[in-house]
């Protein structure tokens, strides 16, 4: 699979996973793990860690998102960050 196809598939999976995000379900946590993320629960937020080319990328998720676009915005930011850093 080419790198571009992988990026597109990864982005679609993240968008589908975060569409309508209200809270983290066990299914969501499992899918994130399958995609290579380490899911960490902290006191006020969730933390997603992703290793890429020997570097750890950290993404913060709200436990109580403010609106329906929060999840899609997070998915977009994750893909943008990873793509800019040799994804």
Image (cartoon, helix red, strand yellow):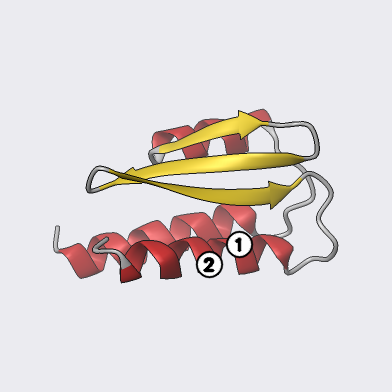
Residue plotted at (73% across, 59% down): 20
**Vertical order, 61 against 84 (above or below):** above
Query: x and y percent of residue 68 in the render?
Result: 79, 66
Residue plotted at (84% across, 49% down): 64
What residue is pinned by disc 1?
A: 74
- Tell whether 63 sits left or right of 9: right
Residue plotted at (56% across, 51% down): 59
Nearest the viewer among 45 and 75 is 45
Find the distance from the CA under tag 2 to the CA under tag 1. 5 Å
What residue is pinned by disc 2?
A: 77
- Tell whether 75 sits left or right of 61: left
Q: Quadrant of the N terminus?
A: bottom left
Residue 81 figure quarter: bottom left
Q: Which mark is residue 82?
A: none
Nearest the viewer among 45 and 6 is 45
Residue plotted at (14% across, 63% down): 2
Q: Quadrant of the C terminus?
A: bottom left
Query: x and y percent of residue 12 in the render?
Result: 45, 63
Near mark 2 (Cα within 10 A), the count class, few <14, some 14-19 or many ≥20, is few
Near mark 1 (Cα within 10 A), the count class, few <14, some 14-19 or many ≥20, is some
Residue 83 figure quarter: bottom left
Q: Secondary structure at mark 2?
A: helix
């Amino acid at each position: 699979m080419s790198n571009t196809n992988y990026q597109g598939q990864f982005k679609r999976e993240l968008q589908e996973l975060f569409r309508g995000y209200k809270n983290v379900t066990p299914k969501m946590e499992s899918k994130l793990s399958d995609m290579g993320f380490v899911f960490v629960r902290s006191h006020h937020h969730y933390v997603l860690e992703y290793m890429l080319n020997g570097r750890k990328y950290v993404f913060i998720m709200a436990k109580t998102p403010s609106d329906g676009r929060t999840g899609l915005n997070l998915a977009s930011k994750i893909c943008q960050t990873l793509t800019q850093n040799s994804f």
